[in-house]
């Protein structure tokens, strides 16, 4: 089989080995008026001074291992699938640590690629359900973990799969590696950047089956999703959605040099601790609540009495705003999650 990757990226250009290093919290600005969130640390690319020995003595996934795995299937990363493969095992270990993976945890991994993160999850004692859209990569991961009965690989598009059904099947079949069925599963994934928002919208309302969602995202998106607050130019309905269903946290930055092929942007790890349904903000209908929020932002700079007048007359919107303790001239970017909740409930009562 022809070696497709070596012809494109000669080994003479191989990046140096990678190591985990800590750096101070961010102190530079993001945009004009918003501070960058403080991170626990940053993953950086520097030379190793001492090789790391894994407890199970397995070889680490690095540049050469990634090339070998891809070449075994005659594959090259596909831009249409947003494929960028992790070259630094330390990043995967930090990703797993951020999710606090314990022996016996049931973990869903979206887009396992060559299985480098899967390998670390298995080492941590997790039972893994890996969902891979690319049939060649799915076949590769199946082969890699064929001897393990607590790794299941599905060749499916996660955004279209029935995740609840799959998790139920695994739970009933006793695939948990420790023999104990966890109450909630977790999601740990190095997501393709082009599906991150869609996946977040799909996962966060699943607090009844997932306790934690830890994702590696494009860094700018990570900052925008986690730290945008009312009054910010980046404030969007997605921020209200995220905080309605979860408690998000920016964990650490991952420079682009840790990926193959190297993307044009850096990445970051974000954790979402999912709320249980009983802890969601008290609205009569989540569907009508988010419909109102989306309508409010259709004219972001317009006053709510204008953007919501299709729901009820402007005068009633003004009365509802005042009843919710808000100015009658309020605009959507001025309202926090709890403000939208009070406004929705006030309109619902009118």
Image (cartoon, rainbow, N blue to C red):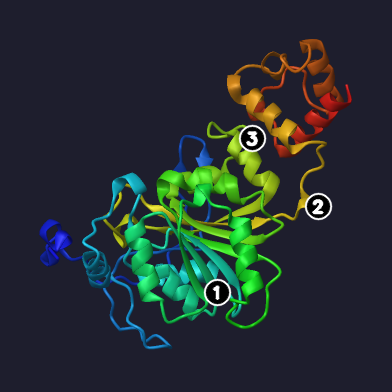
Residue 230's disc is: 3
x then y, percent, for residue 112? 41, 63
Residue 127's disc is: 1
x then y, percent, for residue 273? 65, 58
Residue 106's disc is: none
Q: Is residue 259 above or below residue 241?
A: below
Crowding at label 3, few (<14), some or many (≥20) Cα neighbours within 10 Å?
Answer: some
Can I make out residue 53 in this image?
yes
Residue at screen point 72% across, 14% down: 309
C-alpha span from label 3 to label 2: 25 Å
Q: Earlier in the sequence, mark 1 or mark 2?
A: 1
C-alpha span from label 1 to label 3: 39 Å
Q: Is residue 54 above or below residue 192?
A: below
Badge nearest the viewer, 1 or 2:
1
In the displayed structure image, the side of residue 158 where residue 256 appears, left or right? left
Q: Is residue 250 above or below residue 287?
A: below
x then y, percent, for residue 335? 70, 31
Res. 179 image quadrant: bottom right
The C terminus lies in quadrant: top right
Label 1–label 2 contact, CB within 8 A: no
Residue 278's disc is: 2
Badge nearest the viewer, 3 or 2:
2
Can I make out residue 223 in this image?
no
Res. 177 image quadrant: bottom right
SS of the residue at dot 2?
helix
């Amino acid at each position: 089989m022809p070696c497709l990757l070596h012809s494109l990226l000669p080994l003479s250009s191989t990046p140096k080995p990678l190591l985990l290093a800590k750096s101070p919290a961010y102190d530079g600005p993001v945009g004009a008026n918003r501070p960058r969130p403080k991170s626990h640390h940053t993953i950086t690319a520097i030379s190793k001074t001492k090789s790391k020995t894994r407890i199970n003595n397995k070889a680490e996934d690095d540049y050469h291992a990634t090339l070998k795995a891809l070449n075994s299937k005659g594959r090259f990363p596909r831009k249409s699938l947003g494929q960028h493969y992790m070259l630094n095992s330390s990043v995967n270990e930090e990703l797993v640590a951020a999710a606090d993976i314990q022996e016996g945890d049931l973990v869903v991994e979206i887009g396992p690629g060559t299985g480098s993160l899967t390998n670390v999850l298995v080492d941590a004692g997790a039972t893994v359900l890996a969902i891979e859209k690319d049939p060649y990569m799915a076949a590769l991961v199946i082969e890699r973990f064929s001897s393990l009965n607590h790794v299941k690989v599905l060749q499916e598009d996660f955004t279209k799969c029935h995740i609840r059904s799959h998790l139920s099947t695994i739970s009933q079949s006793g695939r948990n590696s420790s023999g104990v069925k966890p109450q909630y599963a977790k999601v740990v994934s190095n997501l393709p950047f082009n599906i991150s928002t869609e996946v977040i919208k799909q996962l966060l309302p699943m607090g009844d089956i997932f306790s934690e969602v830890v994702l590696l995202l494009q860094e700018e998106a990570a900052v925008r999703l986690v730290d945008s607050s009312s009054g910010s130019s980046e404030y969007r309905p997605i921020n209200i959605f995220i905080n309605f269903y979860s408690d998000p946290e920016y964990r650490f930055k991952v420079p682009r040099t840790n990926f193959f092929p190297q993307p044009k942007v850096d990445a970051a790890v974000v954790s979402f601790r999912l709320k249980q349904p009983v802890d969601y903000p008290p609205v009569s209908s989540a569907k009508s609540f988010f419909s109102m929020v989306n309508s409010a932002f259709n004219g972001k700079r317009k006053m709510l009495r204008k953007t919501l007048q299709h729901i009820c007359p402007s005068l009633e919107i003004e009365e509802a705003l005042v009843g919710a303790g808000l100015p009658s001239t309020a605009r959507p970017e001025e309202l926090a999650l709890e403000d939208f909740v009070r406004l929705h409930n006030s309109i619902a009562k009118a």
